[in-house]
Amino acid sequence: MRDYKNITNLGFEFVDGLENPSGIQEKAWLIPISWLQTEGKPVAEGTTAASIATIAVNHTLKSGKSPILVNALNSKSGSNFKLAGEELSKMFEDDSEFFIPQISADTIGGAAAIKNMRFMILMQRPGQLVGFWQVGTSGMSAKVQDIVGGLGTGSTSEVGLKISLKAFDVVPMYNYTGELPVAGA
């Protein structure tokens, strides 16, 4: 268990003038837990609030594996979290959604392939140039909750897939400062 009593800078700050856009960029990556060779972890006993939620060690994947790229619409995709659980026994529940505005053999086959996998998800916010926000770990993975979609009705309805994933953890998400994982040796 983590012990937070050594944290020296607890506080919640917003500085005027900082960019704070909503949503995620139009690319996210799903990393099946079974494809991980090594997994970076947060510092076990950090002394700053950021150390609780920062992973600074690169993840690597097994030979021949690469992250699954999700090309999603910014306006219909994102990740939100909330507290869940009983009094003094709370965890964070994260709900991530990705809308892919296309129906093709690849998207249908991809939906069939991932429906029973466990993941970590890497995302970036609009304007973010380095690092990722990570939802899920090997110990507390993100799981597919639903995949809905279709060809639409008539000439004006939406065509595509919406993939919904859910994860629980002691932090809402991690600040992964490593590189996009690549296959290990």
Image: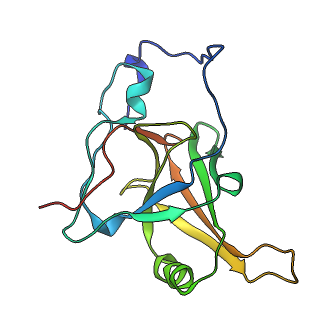
Q: For this view, does 159 lie left or right of residue 95?
A: right
Q: Residue at x 29, y 33 (%)?
A: 44
Image location of residue 163, percent across then percent down: 61, 68
Q: Residue at x 49, y 79 (%)?
A: 110
Residue 176 appears anywhere in the view: yes
Snapshot quadrant of residue 5: top left
Looking at the figure, which quarter contains the N terminus? top left
Snapshot quadrant of residue 46: top left
Looking at the figure, which quarter contains the C terminus? bottom left
Image location of residue 98, percent across then percent down: 61, 61
Residue 3 appears anywhere in the view: no
Image location of residue 11, percent across then percent down: 56, 15
Name, please, the residue furthest toward the left.
Answer: 185
Q: For this view, does 150 lie left or right of residue 14?
A: right
| Front-lying residue, 125 or 113 | 125
Q: Residue at x 50, y 40 (%)?
A: 171
Query: In this figure, what is the number of numbered marks?
Result: 0
Image location of residue 116, percent across then percent down: 48, 77
Q: For this view, does 87 lie left or right of residue 140?
A: right
